[in-house]
Amino acid sequence: MSVIINVDNKVEYILSLMKNPFTEDEFLAKFKETYPEDYEKCWKKFKKEEMNTKKGKTHPMQHPDKHIKNALKSYISRKIKNNENI
């Protein structure tokens, strides 16, 4: 389950604001600007996972920046698979 609620809707909205071509870093910057609460929520969850993980072990949660970039990749991949316009 994604840390960000309605992540597909938010990715779609950010895409509507972006001009092609754009980089993942530009998408991430626009996401942080548009949805700062969600970005902060990702960081809080990430830090909580780190605090609850035993020393020397890793936790499964991705870094928040990677989490958001992967949400973009996943959204685009599903749209392409279903032959839908992005």
Image: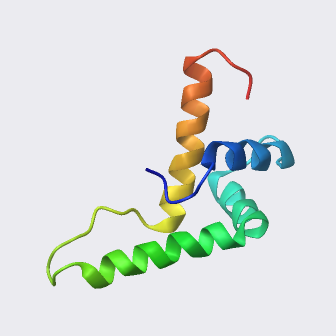
Q: Judge by depth and name the residue closer to the eye, 9 or 86.
A: 9
Instruction: Kindly identify the residue that appears in the image at 74 percent across and 22 percent down.
Output: 85
Protein image colouring: rainbow
Residue 61 vertical position relative to residue 80 in the rendered view, above or below? below
Give coordinates of residue 77: x percent, y percent: 55, 30
Q: How many marks?
A: 0
| 50 displayed left or right of 69 | left
Which image quadrant is residue 35 in? bottom right
Can residue 21 be seen in this snapshot?
yes
Instruction: Kindly identify the residue that appears in the image at 56 percent across and 56 percent down.
Output: 68
| 36 displayed left or right of 5 | right
Instruction: Kindly identify the residue that appears in the image at 53 percent across and 64 percent down.
Output: 65
Q: Residue furthest toward the top?
A: 83
Q: Judge by depth and name the residue closer to the eye, 83 or 53.
A: 53
Instruction: Kindly identify the residue that appears in the image at 52 percent across and 38 percent down.
Output: 74
Q: Judge by depth and name the residue closer to the eye, 7 or 15.
A: 7
Give coordinates of residue 48: x percent, y percent: 38, 80
Give coordinates of residue 17: x percent, y percent: 85, 49
Give coordinates of residue 23: x percent, y percent: 68, 51
Residue 12 vertical position relative to residue 52 in the rendered view, above or below? above
Can residue 19 be seen in this snapshot?
no
Looking at the figure, which quarter contains the C terminus? top right
Residue 82 vertical position relative to residue 4 in the rendered view, above or below? above
Q: Judge by depth and name the residue closer to the eye, 73 or 23.
A: 73
